[in-house]
Every structure is written in structure tokens, then in C-alpha cells.
Amino acid sequence: MKQKWPSDKVQKRKISELIPYARNARTHSDEQVSQLAASIKEWGWTTPVLIDEAGEIIAGHGRVMAARKLGIEEIPTMTATGWSKAQKQAYVLADNQLPQNAGWDMDLLKIEMQDLDENKFNLNLIGFDSDYLASVMFDDKLFEKPENFLTDQNKHIILVELTDEMQCQTLYEEFEERGLNCKLMS
């Protein structure tokens, strides 16, 4: 017998018709909404917003905020039908908390990040801050003492921390023009 899910049909809805859940405990900083917007620009819309029959958002508040930032007027939604008020409230929390209960295989994460970096993929799009990226991608020994910045006999690393984005971009472009292998993290 085929399983009938409470939300198994995707349909586009106007953002103006959606109602944010007033007691949504999950917060979204401007920076995180910008990250979501960048993700949508890179990969398109990959996860529908979950709403109830009245159009109230159950899951996807941040994506809706990002869509507004991008000027997107219609987005994919799925409607959860037949859920009690308690089920909706609980899912608002579960949808945000359950992914946080997962962990990372740090060896595989390092391989994936280094592979993306070698392919010049913009690592800013994957949601990790620059300190975390550096801690995963480079050996911990790098950060113990300055003399340990030599990772092997053919590779030297210099980390430059800049507060001005334009200065960072200019320096990056200058180094790239000189043929240096650069990694831009912010």
C-alpha cells in the first residue's frame, strides 16, 4: 500500500500569502539570511517551505526571508494537512533542532572542503565561518607556533586577516595575477 504523507505535493505560492509563525523560536541574523540568499542564487530553490492549510509557515522562515531579500515573489511550498496545533508547534522546533544533533566526520569534511577549494569553489557558500574553515582545512599544527607554518618542504602558508572587504579582494587579485595559489575566506 502506498504511504500517504501529510505533505506530498509541491506547489508555488506567493510569499505575500504566507504567514510567519509568530512564536518561531529560531532566529535568523542578517548574515545568515544573506548566506541563505547566496545559497538560493547558487543552487536555486531546493527545499520547499512547509506551511499549514492557512498558509502559516511551519518550516522555512529563513528561506522566506532570503527570498524576500532576493525579490522572489513565488516560492515552492508543501502543505501539511491534518496536523494538530501541537504537531505543528513541535515540528517547528524539531525541524530546527534535529539537524543540530548530527555530527561531522572531520576527516571526510576536510577532504570535501579541500577538494572544493582546489576546484576554486566559493567556500563562503557552504555556511562555515573562516575560522572554522581554516581549522578544518589546515593541520592544527599550523596554529601552534609561527615556525610550524611550513607544512611540507614545498608549501608555505601565510594567513592575512583584513577587515576591509575591498582591500581583501584587491590583495587576492594581486596575488592571483602573480600566479600564487590563493584561498579567499571570509
Image (spheres, rainbow, N blue to C red):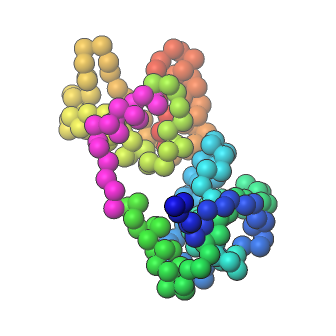
**82 vs 37: above or below:** below
**45 vs 121: above or below:** below
Which image quadrant for residue 31?
Answer: bottom right
**Which residues fall within the magenta stretch?**
101-117
**55 vs 114: above or below:** below
Which residue: 34% across, 56% down? 102
Answer yes or no: is residue 67 visible. Answer: no
Position of 166 with respect to 152 (left or right) is right
Count every numbered label the image shows and give the total.
0
Near-viewer residue (182 or 118): 118
Q: Position of residue 117 (x, y in %)?
A: 46, 30
Which residue: 32% across, 18% down? 155
Position of 144 with respect to 10 (left or right) is left
Which residue: 72% across, 73% down? 18
Answer yes or no: is residue 40 visible. Answer: yes
Near-viewer residue (25 or 76): 76
Considering the whole magenta stretch, tell me its main secondary structure: helix
Q: Position of residue 130 (x, y in %)?
A: 43, 44
